[in-house]
Every structure is written in C-alpha cells, then in structure tokens.
Image: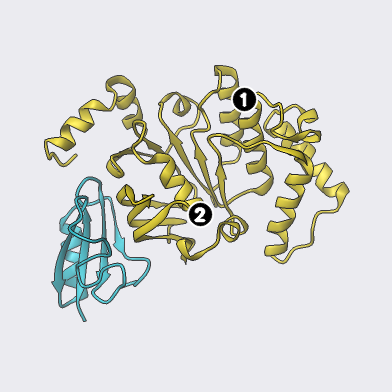
Amino acid sequence: MSPILEIQDLHVSVEEQEILSGVNLSVNAGEVHAIMGPNGSGKSTLASTLAGRPEYQVTAGYAHYRGKDLLEMAPEERAREGLFLAFQYPLELPGVRAWQFLKAAADAGRQHRGEEEYSARDFDRMLREKVKLVDIDPELVRRSVNEGFSGGEKKRNEILQMAILEPTLALLDETDSGLDIDALRIVSDGVNRLRRADNAIVLVTHYQRLLNYITPDRVHVLLDGRIVRSGGPELALELEAQGYDWIKEAVEAGESL
Amino acid sequence: MSYYVLEDLYTSWARVHLGECSSCNYGQGTSEGASTTTQWHGPYEERSQAFEKMESLEKDDARGCQLCNP
C-alpha cells in the first residue's frame, strides 16, 4: 500500500535560515499522526510547507502526496487535491460570509473532481448536517468568516471547513492552542468523527492534552528541525511526564533513540 | 544499475533507492553537505542486496522509494 504522504530528507529554509533539517515521514491511509515538539522545533514549518506557503523554501528532499510530487503543486492545487490545513491562527475575512466561503471552497473541489457544483438547497442541507457534526453555533456561518469569533469558535470553524471539504490529508496546526477544556473536547470529537479508512490526519501540537481525546497511531518528536523519535501513543504520555529535555539530552549525547 | 539504502538514524525508517534516483543522487542525496539525520549505505549491485541491507537495519517502516520504485 502506498502512503498518502511520503516525505524524505526534507530541508526547508525561511529567509536563508534552515528550519527543517532532514525530515523523513510516511503517513498511510486511515492513520492519525501527531507531530510534537518544543517551541521553535519546526512543527508549524512542516505543516505550512506541506500546504504550500510560499515563504517556506524547500532546499532539499521531496514530499509525495498520493504518489504525486506535492512540492510542484501550487497551494490551491494542493487544496483541490484534498490537502487541508487548519490554521493555528485562523484569519478573519470581513465582508465574506462564512457559508459563501465554504460553498466556494466545496464547489472548487467538486469542479476539480468533475462533479457539479452544489445547488443552494443541497449545500444548505449538507451544511446543516456538518454544523451539527462539529457542534458549532449555526448563526456563525451567516456571519463574516471568523469576524468577532472567539478563539474556540475560530477553531471550530476550521473543523467545520474540514468536515465540509472532506480532505484526504488534514494537517491540524496547533488546533488545541487557546482552547478551554470544553472547546477542546468539542473540537476533538469533531476530528474523531472525520477519521476514515481512506483519509489521514496529521496533528501538530505542543501538548499531550489534545491526545487525551484524539488517539494517534503514531507520535513523532520534532527537535531542531528533525524527527528524533517516533513511537506509539505511549510516547506522548512519556513526553507529558518528562517533558522534552530528556530527548534533547539524549540527542546531544549522540544517542540513537 | 546500482542501489542504495537511506537510513534515518533517529527513527525506525529506511528506503531503498536506485542510484540514479534524483533523491538518491548515487548516495549523495539532495542536501548540501553531510546530513546529520540520515546515512546512505551502498552502492549495491543487486536489488536483493540492497533490500537485505535494509532488512538488516530492522526498521519498522522500510520499503522502496516511492519516487524511483526500485
């Protein structure tokens, strides 16, 4: 079985400074992977590079998505091919109503797959179902995208987008940041309901607490721009108990983990 | 034809490559200078030799490169 995402020896720089220094990672269909690491380790750089943010320059290595060269695709092409990035800091779009934004995004994907655009009635029916799925206030989709939303509402709106677009590969960049415990549970429930055998989810997170609600298949520790340890869900618990220092010390001592 | 094995030194990951694969570049890789996270093994004349080497590394995630499909 070919992985949905295959990354090999990926090096990425921002403004001439290398942030990722040789990342190797494979993500198979049906899997949830958690990328953990201290601040500044390169977690968000990895997610942003895969989504195609232009300020991130790939200097070596490759990333294949469903057998295609992901790095050759424009960001919008990646999105149409089913790659989704939930932002750490979702942007506000004053004047653009959330439901219009969501319909435009959903229709772009359908057009790309050779399907007809949603009729207004069909989209409204689907939107109502998804709103229930992620437990978001229906009033929010009538307002401008993220304008005046609380931090938790913005994150829930990201998961609503994910529910509507049904991506093959979802990258969630610190979706848990800024959430209280109730919002964290609601967002996690939404993500869990979107897990399928034919998609994959990569969670970027600093803390283990998100993984109390979303059980990953694999956990990877990113340190100084490279994955220095991979394991099962128990690795996240180990990090919660001991922090990142023990891994830093082992890497500095040259120990193979 | 030559074959190489790329080993991740920190995680349980390895890939077999054809020497001419753009990602392998005959065991030089694509990054400038020596990588601190990976190590190339080879060249091997036979495909089976490369796969045997990969198996000997006892990595959980071990397969052929998706790019060159050795």
Chain letter for cyan, please: B
| Placement of B45 over or under B63, stated as above or below | below
Q: Secondary structure at mark 2?
A: loop
Q: Is residue A76 left or right of residue A11?
A: right
Q: Is residue A166 left or right of residue B10?
A: right
Q: CA distance from mark 1 to mark 2?
A: 25 Å
Q: Residue at the spot x=66%, y=34% of the render?
A: A157
Expressed as whole percent of the image width and height from the top left, the position of residue B69 reads 34, 71
Mark closer to the chain start, 1 or 2: 2
Expressed as whole percent of the image width and height from the top left, the position of residue A34 reads 41, 38
Q: Secondary structure at mark 1?
A: helix
- Name, please, the residue furthest toward the bottom: B1
| Placement of A218 over or under A210, stated as above or below | below
Q: Which mark is residue B16?
A: none
Q: Residue at the spot x=74%, y=34% of the render?
A: A131
Expressed as whole percent of the image width and height from the top left, the position of residue A4 reads 47, 56
Q: Which image quadrant for residue A3?
A: bottom left
Say which of B55 and A3 sits in front. A3
Q: Residue at the spot x=51%, y=51% of the render?
A: A51
Q: Which residue is mark 2?
A: A52
Q: Is residue A198 left or right of residue A107?
A: left
